[in-house]
Amino acid sequence: NSYRTVYAFAREMYPKKKDTYLQYGTAGFRTKATELHHVMYRMGLLAVLRARYKKGVIGVMVTASHNPEADNGVKIIDPRGEMLEEAWESWATKFANVVDEKLEDTINEVIKLFNIDNMNDRVEIVIGKDTRPSSLPLAKAVQDGVLALSGKPIDYGIVTTPQVHYFVVCKNTNRAYGQPTEEGYYRKLINAFLRVRGDKYNKGNYENRLMYDGANGVGAKKVKYLREVLKESLLVEMYNDEIIGSGKLNHLCGADYVKSQQKFPNGVPKEKNTRCCSVDGDADRIVYYYLDDNERFHLLDGDRIATLAASYLKELLQKTGLDLKIGLVQSAYANGASTEYISNKLNISVSCTATGVKHLHRKALTYDIGVYFEANGHGTVVFSNNAKQKLVATARNNSTSADHKEACFKLLDVIDLINETVGDAISDMLLVETILHERGWDVKQWEECYTDLPNKLLKVTVKDRNVVTTTDAERICVTPEGLQDEINTIVSKYKKGRSFVRASGTEDIIRVYAEAATKEDTELLAIEVAQKVY
Ligand code: NG1
Ligand code: ZN
């Protein structure tokens, strides 16, 4: 049969070490790079099965995102650019953990269970990798897995995670979404950006200069190209752009460091009142920040980007005269002040889902214009086919008023500026810059929209994190019994207090989130709740 070589290959090239057990979590597999060769090979196999089952192109991205350089990981991307469907996550876990001798049996189980009857299809698997030195051999292992089952690996080399999502969607929509090449990706974003921006680069308080922290990763490499093309329209000053093998990837810099430490990154000059942004190691997250006159650090995170984008899109939508449903999706980690601002000031419907972009993305798809962001800076905007069709029809209709027409064309450009397939640091940056430019805002005006409540995130190590289970988008604790009552009692003592606990999906810990009216109260609240979790 066509996969006679699967076992031989596994045994000779990518044997599974004994005693390793890995689980496909919210972000795929992630661990020390040295533990992953057999996993990569097997994900190549699984991707081919998934592609045959879905009769479409599947993506595989080799990255450990914001983790240290010595780690690596892999995630599988479904035909519509979404994260691998949950039902197959457990197959991914099974594939990663069976002994070499059982690999072919496991393949047969999947073929049988899903009635895969097209095992000769030469399905395409899009493969991308980040700048980690370990990514090269690991991506090669994915390719070998694809080849072992007679699939067709398409190697895009070093690219960002969102680029891989984009390529997959382009291929599966017959290029309706764009050309499945890096050039096609840039062209789509850049053309839209330049059209919306026009030739007036500075406006009001907006200055077209931005300090950019590339986290010494792929986000630096890719923005270098963009910078050349954008020239004077947007002056992106590059920092932390040592790319391959420097050992500095995400080290004291990057979006995760800035957000979780609430600190200015190393490697970026401490210039006051200047707009700065940081991306993470695979460029799917971005946060903004600046230092004020007193060198105090101010963070503008995913919640800020979400509210900026949603208010802008709502305004633009009103100008088109079209009746479309806009909504914003957050997780429980969104700052309470942002949620209040969205519902009370912006009058935009806001909903909360469980942590993890696949949950937010799915909910966002229920709107015509669905904006979603995690507080950590991962997010995007999705537009329904209904919205796109109405916009195109209205823009082309001769009886549409000139104002409405202009707004429709502009919104269509803004749609092109956005990578709808997944959160994309580069595309999100261009969107933020577009909105600030149009409003003539500097970073302080953006910040003045609302005042963040002080907040604190703690990690608690417990014997078994699975004892904590939750409901209501993770905001209410179901087990251990009685814990939620205790949390309620504690929270009620604090003005504007809110706190919840949940088991992390990516680390072996319990996370405790707290916010309250003052910084002191927030610290106390977090500690009080954490003590109940021990
Ligand atoms: P967990 O470890 O499940 O809290 C973290 C982030 C998520 C998401 C995933 C995937 C927080 C509190 N959690 O999830 O937002 O980004 O990693 O990378 O930031
Ligand atoms: Zn990432």
Image (cartoon, grey):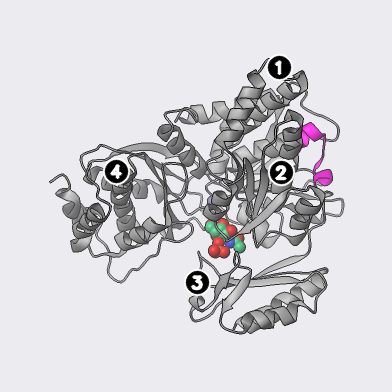
- Looking at the image, residue 107 lies above or below residue 194: below
User: Does the residue at mark 4 contact the one at mark 3 (Cβ under 8 Å)?
Assistant: no
Q: Residue, x 61% and y 24% (percent of image)?
A: 392
SS of the residue at dot 3? loop
Q: Decide which of tag 3 and tag 2 comes sooner along the chain.
A: 2
- Looking at the image, residue 513 lies above or below residue 405: below
User: Does the residue at mark 2 contact the one at mark 1 (Cβ under 8 Å)?
Assistant: no
Distance Cα–Cα, label 1 vs label 3? 60 Å
For the image, the number of numbered tags is 4
Q: Decide which of tag 2 and tag 1 comes sooner along the chain.
A: 2
Give the residue number, with chain letter if any, for mark 4: 52
Mark number, residue 170: none
Magenta stretch: residue 440 in it?
Answer: yes
Label 1 amino acid? Ser
Distance Cα–Cα, label 4 vs label 1? 47 Å
Give the side of residue 327 with respect to residue 207, left or right: left
Magenta residues (range): 436-446
10 Å crowding of disc 4: few (<14), some (14-19), many (20+): many
Mark number, residue 508: 3
Label 4 amino acid? Arg
Distance Cα–Cα, label 2 vs label 1? 28 Å
Give the residue number, with chain letter if any, for mark 2: 310
Distance Cα–Cα, label 2 vs label 4? 38 Å
Q: Decide which of tag 2 and tag 4 comes sooner along the chain.
A: 4
SS of the residue at dot 4? helix
Distance Cα–Cα, label 4 vs label 3? 34 Å
- Looking at the image, residue 33 lies above or below residue 389: below
